[in-house]
Image (spheres, rainbow, N blue to C red):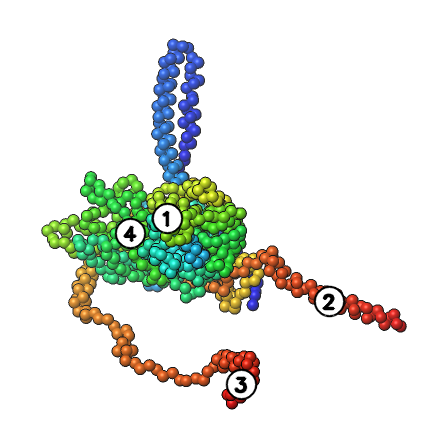
Amino acid sequence: WDYRRALPYLAFFCLFFFKMEFRSCCPGWSACCLPFSSCYFLTLPDKMKIKCRFQKAYRRALDHEEEALSSGSVQEAEAMLDEPQEQAEGSLTVYMISEHSSLLPQDMMSYIGPKRTAVVRGIMHREAFNIIGRRIVQVAQAMSLTEDVLAAALADHLPEDKWSAEKRRPLKSSLGYEITFSLLNPDPKSHDVHWDIEGAVRRYVQPFLNALSAAGNFSVDSQILYYAMLGVNPRFDSASSSYYLDMHNLPHVINPVESRLGSSAASLYPVLNFLLYVPELAHSPLYIQDKDGAPVATNAFHSPRWGGIMVYNVDSKTYNASVLPVRVEVDMVRVMEVFLAQLRLLFGIAQPQVPPKCLLSGPKSEGLMTWELDRLLWARSVENLATATTTLTSLAQLLGKISNIVIKDDVASEVYRAVAAVQKSAGELASGHLASAFVASQEAVTSSERAFFDPSLLHLLYFPDDQKFAIYIPLFLPMAVPILLSLVKIFLETHKSWKKPEKTD
Amino acid sequence: MESQKPAGLLYGTASAPSGAGSLKPANMAVTYCFSRLATALVAVLLLSFGSVAASHVEDQAEQFFRSGHTNNWAVLVCTSRFWFNYRHVANTLSVYRSVKRLGIPDSHIVLMLADDMACNPRNPKPATVFSHKNMELNVYGDDVEVDYRSYEVTVENFLRVLTGRIPPSTPRSKRLLSDDRSNILIYMTGHGGNGFLKFQDSEEITNIELADAFEQMWQKRRYNELLFIIDTCQGASMYERFYSPNIMALASSQVGEDSLSHQPDPAIGVHLMDRYTFYVLEFLEEINPASQTNMNDLFQVCPKSLCVSTPGHRTDLFQRDPKNVLITDFFGSVRKVEITTETINLQQGSEIMESSYKEDQMDEEAMEPLKYAEQLPVAQIIHQKPKLKDWHPPGGFILGLWALIIMVFFKTYGIKHMKFIF
């Protein structure tokens, strides 16, 4: 059966909503007088406006919190303030301390912590409320959605802006991701390389992926490839008696290796490849030079939407007096530091816009701050909603243009499901439930893609009018001539027989 | 954004000293020299600043004109079958070979060949497909991966590949898994006419269907930029109807013209290549992954004197200027690369590391010797007796056939023969 359902116009002014809770431990502060509006607009290119709303809650700090906030350093305070239950996604807790508190270094006015908490210093000033209000808004914006995060998420659907590498780098939102670690050993005769990848994954990568588990399913695998060469010959630098790879050569390194990685056969999810290359003895040590000619500290580079490569140089001390092949134990900590940083970049965990005079704490041991996950989920939800909406709209346009496509029942039900999921996700975003909004947006994308890419929707029959005439006229015209003539004859006869009785009467 | 000092400032200041020459003659010489010196100094300074600014401008210009793609795909289609269409298979395989040589991996190439020339019984040199007389270049090679072969090359499958509406059981090598940052090269060759291309001698794809398929791809953002090359008779008619953005098209001949083949080979007995693709292959053989040749050079390949037909191209739907589009943007796979400058601080758990290392060692020693699992019960299979099939009476078709034969026999020779049976 065929249906033409008018898709609901999903106006794209969805509200974003998050909760902020103020806990003040400065005497004489009534925080409810802070004059910042609880609603502001983010403006994207193409005049799209998105409304963000805060919900504020205030209270004085409890005793144990006051005690924690009067400790010596922020890290101790953080440890003592550790909440027994995790705060909900999309919420923020802001602690206000007095002007003379020694919790923060003297010149720092605010601090952003790794677990959805922030500390803002109060001041005694005529314009105190305005200044503090501005600071709080800046801190809140750094920890939540900003225009560039949204613009990056919606990059497909906004007019092209070609010169931002940040927008092209992250992976598109998907249900799951596959991460492959490969060790490339081109010279097994000289290096007998061992890496404790399983342990390193268990200790460093798995906690990071567990922290990110709300954003999708992850699967990790690893392999060792022997005799896998880079496609480029490194050049010798006599000044440091080492070999180097110029930045211009780096793009050509990936292709010869990629066909041997075998990663694309594994699953339908997007794959991120992380390669660790141990250069051969003839080309050791090997450094990567950036465009100024200086060796790169991490000795690694990455390619957007593909993965990263790190060159691991064997310590020259291991060669002394030993027989080839030398046993090389890879220092997994150093390697994982680089790979996790690359994973963060490739995943689109953007650097926040830190407000002036603000101290940003480093990420926790997992490598991911909780509010960074919130930003990622927000950006992904927006991206999913935009994708689902455009898919459904183009499906409707397709049906409008080609009138003889038949819509089966299951395609129709997928479309209904997608629309319901989009509405649910927008509603959840407006009420601040980030996790369920993200799940609903993923469902919306899956259903809309299943409906759009259903194999039965292929339209094959283009039948122009002149071809219709050319096919049917030679068949029907000769047939039609005697039929028409006999019809005319019958008509004339009946006409005559009607007339005859009149005449005789 | 850097403020860019326009180069015109240089000219402005250089013309200043001409007004200084109107003073008294004695001072005039001195002041003139002095002002000349000053302006020379200023000019030198501005020149150096200008060159610095110019390099900044160049850097930004490079960034601006660079393509925004991160991966490359190629869909190469040969639509004709039969031995005398050897040249179409050779065309497609030469483009396949160039594309692979310049870096696109097999997993990103969808190769559709409508007939098998290399193992054709009429091929005097089996397992080869030559593109040049005197058999200089075997484009079949050792590592060809054909994704759609022989009767699988149909209009329906081609459109399914392009639009992505593929049944879920299709293997990954037969899918076009491009995304919004993919540059796709689509090459089609075969026999064509005004507005259509013939597939397998039995069906056609029209230019409107192709344009609609590209629009579907654009709606779902399955490509960043698309290069469409077609080598058939009246090939330009196939790109007339495109209306989606970011498509560049090349054809070997205009409407009303025929594309001609290059040269026959007396040993193989057929024409080996079409002229347009032959010259394109010669052009591509000189390109390497690092070359900076742009699309304007590709437009000049095979002028009318060599090709007899007039190659055409269409760039109005393409946003960038063709002279800024590198050949390797479509034919090769040059990745964008960034240096990793940051790391994360991880705490070291060295004791844990040592103990787990010891555990691994012990695990290695304690593992059993490996053996193959029992996969097939070979002994059972060998010694099986053949199964007795039940006997069924002949079915309706056989009965009907025999009844027909008997009736015809008796009709022809007369009913009197019936009495010999009964």
Residue indicated by mark 4: A309
Judge left or right: residue A466 versus residue A178: right
**Mark 2 or mark 3: which is in front?**
3
Q: Secondary structure at mark 1?
A: helix
Residue at point 35%, 82% (across, down): B387
Subunit under mark 3: B
- Tell me which corner region of the image, top left, top right, bottom left or bottom right, holds residue B51: top left
Give the farthest residue toward the right. Answer: A505
Residue pointed to by mark 1: B133
Query: Alpha-carbon neighbours of circle 3 within 10 Å: few (<14), some, or many (≥20)?
Result: few
Answer yes or no: is residue B43 visible.
Answer: yes
Q: Image check: B147 left or right of A253?
A: right
Q: Which residue is at a point 31% across and 48% down the rendered structure image?
A: A252
In the image, what residue type sits under mark 2?
A: Leu
Question: Which is more foreground, mark 4 or mark 2?
Answer: 2
Q: Amino acid at mark 3?
A: His
